C-alpha cells in the first residue's frame, strides 16, 4: 500500500506543512516494553497518555504522542490537559500500566491499560470510557496521534484508508510506517497539519473531524479518529475499545502486525507480556525493601527501567527514553537522551550486575567490544549501531569498560578460558589512557577539560584492572608498566586537584579540598591561577577560579578506592561540598553538580535552552550515600536512600534533576519534585540498585579491589618520575628514577655533568603505544640532568635540549 493519491471528494488540508514540530514532555510517568526479541517497540507515558513510542530501535522515536479528546455539544476536553492523572503498574516488576484520567470538571473518566505485544512491534491500549455526568451517548471519544517518523516531525505523510476491509489510520516517513486500528468502528477519520487543520483544531472549534481531509503530505501532521464507543457487545462492552498502533517498513507490514495483535485480544497478549517479565524478574537477587503491598516496590521499578532501556539484539542500553525539555525541542535535537553514553552504559551494567542480571551485564561488555574505536577509545555518545553522535573525548568513558570487564570477571561471568576474548579491548583501552591521559578533553558532565578527580579515579582504577588482565595473559612487564603509570598518576592527584589556603578553606577551618576540575600547568604553586569556563550560563564568558569550583565528583576518590573515607583531605572536601552544594529538603539532602552550574531551567522555570540554572541531582544523593557507607555510617546511607527514592515520580521513576525553588504550578514545577529534564534517568536507577546491594552487603558493591588494596590498605613504592613532551617537568625529587616517555621509537642522549660526558640509551616499547627509558637517577643528589631525543623512524634529533633539576 503506497501512499495513496488523493481520492475524489477529498481536499488538501490547509496550513501545510504545519507549525514547527516539537517533541513532548520528558516527565515520563511510565516506560515499558516486552521481554522479547520479537517485539522491537518501546513506549512511554506522561500526563495520562502514551507519548514517545520507539521502533524498531531504542534510538528511533516514531510518535510524539497518542491521546484522546472528549467532546459533547458545546464541550471540548483533552485528557492530558483537562484531567487528573494516576498511574500504576499492573504488577510489581511488570511495566504494563493502568492509567486513570478523571476530568477535573467531573464529567468523565478514561481508564486504559497500556502494554506492548511480545510477538510484534505493536503497542496496545485497552480503553474504558465512563460518563460520570450524563450518559455514554452524550459524548464522543476521539483519538489524536502525532507521528514523528523517524526522530523528526517534519516531512511525514499521513492518510486514512481501509486495509482488507478494516478501517485504519496510516503514516510514513524516513523509511518507516505506522498503522492504527481499533476493535470498534471509526465514526470519522481525518488527517491534517498540526496547529492549523489537525483534529485538535477542528474539534476545539466544535466542527468535528473533517473527513474531506483524507491525507496530508510532507509536513508536521496529525491523525485523528472518532471511536464508536457504543459498538461493544452487550451492556458490559459499552464504552470499551482496544486500540493498537503497529510499525513496519511498509504500511502493509504495519497494518498486518496491528491487526494480528488486535485480533489476538487483550488477555492472551497481556498474559504473555506478564510471563516474560515475571521470568526475568525471578532470576534477580531479592534486594526488595520491606514495603506495603499496596505501595511501589521501588527495587522492581528500577530493575524494570534498566531492562526496558536495553536493546536485546545488541546489548546496548540508552541513557533515557526521553528528550530533556522535549516540549521545547524540535527536529534539530535528533539524539535527545536515546543515545548510548559509555559512562551511563557501564554504570547501568553495574546496576544489572548488582541485581544479579549477569547475562545482561555481560552483553553490555560484548557490545562495547565491537563499538570501540580503532585507537582504543569510545566516543562521547553514539547511536545503537556505534555511529558517533558527538565526538568529544571523555577519558573516564575509555576506562569504564575495563572496570566492567573486571567486575564481570570477579562475578564469575567470565571464566579463565574466555579472558583472551576481551584482552584486545582491554589492552587497546589501556593504551589509549596511557597515551592520552590523565587530563581529559571533557569531564563527566561533558563541559570542561583538565584534571578531574572523578576522571582520574576511573582512569587509575582502569589501569590497575588492565594490569591484572595482561598479567593473567603472561605479560608481566606490561602489567608492571601499567601499575607504575597508575601509581604515578595517583601520587599527583593532590598536585593537580587539591586546593589549600583558599578563602573557602579558611572560612570552613579546613586545610583544603579537592576541586571539580583544574588545568593548572606543572609547577604552578596554586590552583587559583587557573580559570575554568562555566558552561550553560547566560554570560558565555563566565569563568571561575579552579580552587573555588567545588563538585561532589571528588567522592569518586573514595568510591573507586583511591582514598580512605576518613582521609583528612576527604573530610575537608566533604565540608566544602556541603557548604557550597548541599540543599536539605523535607525529604532529605540533595546536591548540585557544581557551583554556578547552568544546566537546568531558567530562573522562573522556563525550559533550558542553552543556558539556565543548574538544579539538584538525586543521583548525587545516591553517590553520597555510598560515601557514607564507606565511612561506616550505614544509618546515614539508609536515610539518603530514602531521599533518593522520595525524588521519584508517582510511578517510581527517578529524574535527572528536581526543582529547587518556589513552586511554579503553571510549569508543573514543585519543590523537590522532578523538573523538566530527563525522566527516567537510567543511570540514577542503576545507582539506586547498587545502593540497595551495597547496603545489603555492607560494602560498596562496585569499588575496585585493586585500588583500595594498593592505595588505602597499603602504599606502593614510589613510581618513576615521568617526563613527556606533552607534560614536561623541570624539577624532580632526589632518589627517584626519571622516566622519559615518548610516543615512538627513540634514543635518549643524556648527561649528569653538563654534557662533559653523555650516554645514548634506547627507549623500549611498552606495548601500549609508548616507548620509555628510565634514567638511573636514584642515587643522584641535587644537580641537573640534561637530555635530548633522537627519533629513530625519522632519523632526526629533536633539536632541543631539555633540563631537569634534581632537588
Image (cartoon, helix red, strand yellow):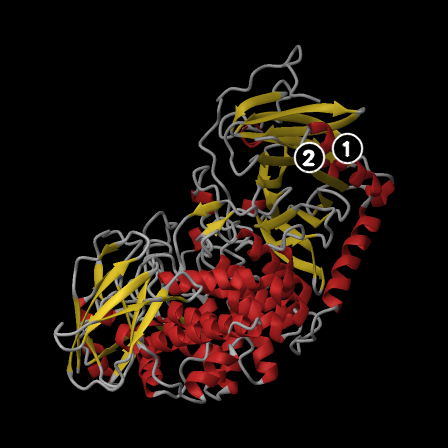
Instruction: Measure the alpha-carbon separation of dots 2 and 1.
Output: 9 Å
Quadrant of residue 235 in the image? Answer: top right
Q: Position of residue 3 (x, y in %)?
A: 64, 21
Location of residue 409 with respect to 564 vertically, above or below: above
Q: Split into 4 quadrants, where in the image is the N terminus?
A: top right
Q: Split into 4 quadrants, where in the image is the C terminus?
A: bottom left
Near-viewer residue (732 or 260)? 732
**Dot 2 lies on which element?**
strand
Near-viewer residue (368 or 221)? 368
What's the residue at 77%, 58% (across, down)?
276
Residue at the disc numbered 2: 248
Q: Which mark is residue 744?
A: none
Residue at the disc numbered 1: 256
**Dot 1 lies on which element?**
helix
Characterize the local packing of mark 1: few (<14), some (14-19) or many (20 or more) Cα atoms within 10 angstroms.
some
50 horizontally vs 273: left or right: left
Q: Position of residue 34 (x, y in %)?
A: 71, 52
Characterize the local packing of mark 2: few (<14), some (14-19) or many (20 or more) Cα atoms within 10 angstroms.
many
Quadrant of residue 756 in the image? Answer: bottom left
State yes or no: discs 2 and 1 in contact (Cβ < 8 Å): yes
- Whether residue 48 is visible to the viewer of this picture, yes or no, is no
Amino acid at each position: 500500500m503506497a501512499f495513496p493519491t488523493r481520492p475524489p471528494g477529498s481536499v488538501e488540508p490547509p496550513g501545510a506543512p504545519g507549525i514547527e514540530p516539537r517533541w513532548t514532555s520528558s516527565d515520563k510517568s511510565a516506560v515499558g516494553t516486552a521481554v522479547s526479541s520479537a517485539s522491537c517497540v518501546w513506549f512511554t507515558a506522561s500526563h495520562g497518555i502514551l507519548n514517545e513510542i520507539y521502533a524498531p530501535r531504542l534510538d528511533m522515536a516514531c510518535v510524539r504522542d497518542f491521546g484522546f479528546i472528549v467532546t459533547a455539544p458545546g464541550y471540548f476536553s483533552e485528557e492530558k490537559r483537562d484531567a487528573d492523572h494516576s498511574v500504576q503498574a499492573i504488577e510489581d516488576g511488570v511495566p504494563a500500566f493502568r492509567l486513570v484520567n478523571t476530568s477535573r470538571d467531573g464529567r468523565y473518566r478514561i481508564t486504559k491499560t497500556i502494554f506492548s505485544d511480545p510477538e510484534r512491534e505493536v503497542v496496545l491500549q485497552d480503553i474504558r470510557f465512563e460518563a460520570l455526568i450524563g450518559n455514554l451517548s452524550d459524548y464522543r471519544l476521539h483519538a489524536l496521534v502525532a507521528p514523528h517518523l523517524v526522530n523528526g516531525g517534519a516531512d511525514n505523510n499521513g492518510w486514512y484508508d481501509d486495509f482488507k476491509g478494516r478501517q485504519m489510520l496510516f503514516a510514513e516517513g524516513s523509511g518507516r510506517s505506522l498503522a492504527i486500528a481499533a476493535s470498534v468502528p471509526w465514526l470519522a477519520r481525518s488527517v491534517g497539519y498540526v496547529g492549523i487543520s489537525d483534529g485538535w483544531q477542528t474539534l476545539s472549534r466544535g466542527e468535528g473531524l473533517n473527513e474531506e481531509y483524507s491525507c496530508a503530505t510532507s509536513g508536521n501532521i496529525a491523525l485523528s479518529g472518532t471511536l464508536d464507543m457504543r459498538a461493544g457487545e452487550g451492556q458490559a462492552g459499552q464504552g470499551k475499545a482496544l486500540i493498537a498502533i503497529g510499525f513496519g517498513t511498509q504500511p502493509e507490514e504495519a497494518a498486518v502486525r496491528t491487526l494480528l495483535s488486535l485480533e489476538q485480544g487483550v488477555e492472551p497478549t497481556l498474559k504473555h507480556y506478564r510471563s516474560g517479565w515475571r521470568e526475568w524478574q525471578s532470576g534477580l537477587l531479592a534486594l526488595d525493601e520491606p514495603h506495603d503491598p499496596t505501595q511501589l516496590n521501588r527495587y522492581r521499578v528500577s530493575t524494570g527501567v534498566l531492562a526496558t532501556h536495553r536493546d536485546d539484539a545488541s546489548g546496548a542500553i540508552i541513557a533515557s527514553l526521553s528528550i530533556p525539555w522535549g516540549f521545547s525541542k524540535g527536529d534539530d535535537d535528533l539524539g535527545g537522551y536515546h543515545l548510548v553514553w559509555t559512562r551511563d552504559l557501564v554504570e547501568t551494567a553495574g546496576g544489572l550486575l548488582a541485581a544479579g542480571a549477569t547475562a545482561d551485564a555481560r552483553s553490555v561488555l560484548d557490545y562495547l567490544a565491537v563499538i570501540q574505536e580503532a585507537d582504543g577509545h569510545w566516543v562521547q555518545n553514539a547511536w545503537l549501531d556505534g555511529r558517533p553522535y558527538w565526538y568529544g573525548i571523555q577519558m573516564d568513558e575509555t576506562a569504564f569498560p575495563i572496570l566492567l570487564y573486571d567486575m564481570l570477571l570477579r562475578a564469575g561471568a567470565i571464566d579463565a578460558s574466555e579472558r583472551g576474548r576481551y584482552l584486545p579491548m582491554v589492552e587497546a583501552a589501556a593504551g589509549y589512557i596511557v597515551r592520552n591521559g590523565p587530563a581529559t578533553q571533557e569531564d563527566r558532565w561533558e563541559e570542561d577539560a583538565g584534571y578531574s578527580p572523578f576522571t582520574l579515579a576511573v582512569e587509575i582504577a582502569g589501569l590497575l584492572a588492565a594490569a591484572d588482565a595482561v598479567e593473567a595473559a603472561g605479560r608481566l612487564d606490561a602489567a608492571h608498566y601499567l601499575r607504575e603509570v597508575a601509581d604515578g598518576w595517583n601520587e599527583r592527584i593532590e598536585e593537580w586537584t587539591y586546593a589549600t589556603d583558599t578563602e573557602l578553606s579558611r572560612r570552613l577551618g579546613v586545610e583544603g579540598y579537592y576541586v571539580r576540575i583544574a588545568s593548572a600547568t606543572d609547577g604552578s604553586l596554586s590552583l587559583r591561577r587557573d580559570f575554568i569556563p562555566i558552561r550553560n550560563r547566560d554570560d558565555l564568558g563566565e569563568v571561575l577560579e579552579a580552587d573555588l569550583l567545588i563538585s561532589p565528583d571528588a567522592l569518586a576518590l573514595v568510591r573507586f578506592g583511591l582514598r580512605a573515607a576518613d582521609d583528612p583531605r576527604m573530610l575537608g572536601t566533604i565540608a566544602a561540598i556541603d557548604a557550597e552544594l548541599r540543599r536539605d529538603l523535607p525529604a532529605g539532602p540533595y546536591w548540585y553538580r557544581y557551583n554556578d552550574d547552568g544546566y537546568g531551567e531558567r530562573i522562573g522555570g522556563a525550559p533550558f535552552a542553552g543556558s539556565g540554572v543548574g538544579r539538584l541531582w538525586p543521583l548525587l544523593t545516591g553517590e553520597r550515600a555510598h560515601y557514607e557507607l564507606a565511612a561506616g555510617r550505614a544509618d546515614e546511607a539508609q536515610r539518603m536512600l530514602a531521599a533518593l527514592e522520595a525524588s521519584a515520580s508517582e510511578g517510581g521513576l527517578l529524574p535527572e534533576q528536581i526543582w529547587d525553588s518556589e513552586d511554579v504550578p503553571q510549569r508543573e514545577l514543585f519543590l523537590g519534585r522532578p523538573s523538566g529534564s530527563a525522566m527516567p534517568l537510567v543511570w540514577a536507577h542503576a545507582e539506586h540498585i547498587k545502593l540497595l546491594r551495597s547496603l545489603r552487603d555492607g560494602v560498596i558493591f562496585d569499588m575496585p579491589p585493586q585500588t583500595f588494596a594498593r592505595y588505602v590498605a597499603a602504599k606502593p613504592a614510589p613510581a618513576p618520575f615521568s617526563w613527556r613532551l606533552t607534560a614536561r617537568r623541570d624539577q624532580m625529587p632526589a632518589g627517584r628514577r626519571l622516566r622519559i616517555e615518548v610516543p615512538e621509537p627513540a634514543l635518549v642522549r643524556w648527561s649528569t655533568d653538563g654534557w662533559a660526558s653523555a650516554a645514548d640509551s634506547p627507549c623500549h616499547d611498552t606495548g601500549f603505544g609508548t616507548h620509555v627509558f628510565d634514567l638511573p637517577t636514584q642515587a643522584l643528589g641535587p644537580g641537573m640532568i640534561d637530555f635530548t631525543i633522537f627519533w629513530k623512524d625519522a632519523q632526526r634529533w629533536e633539536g632541543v635540549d631539555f633540563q631537569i633539576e634534581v632537588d
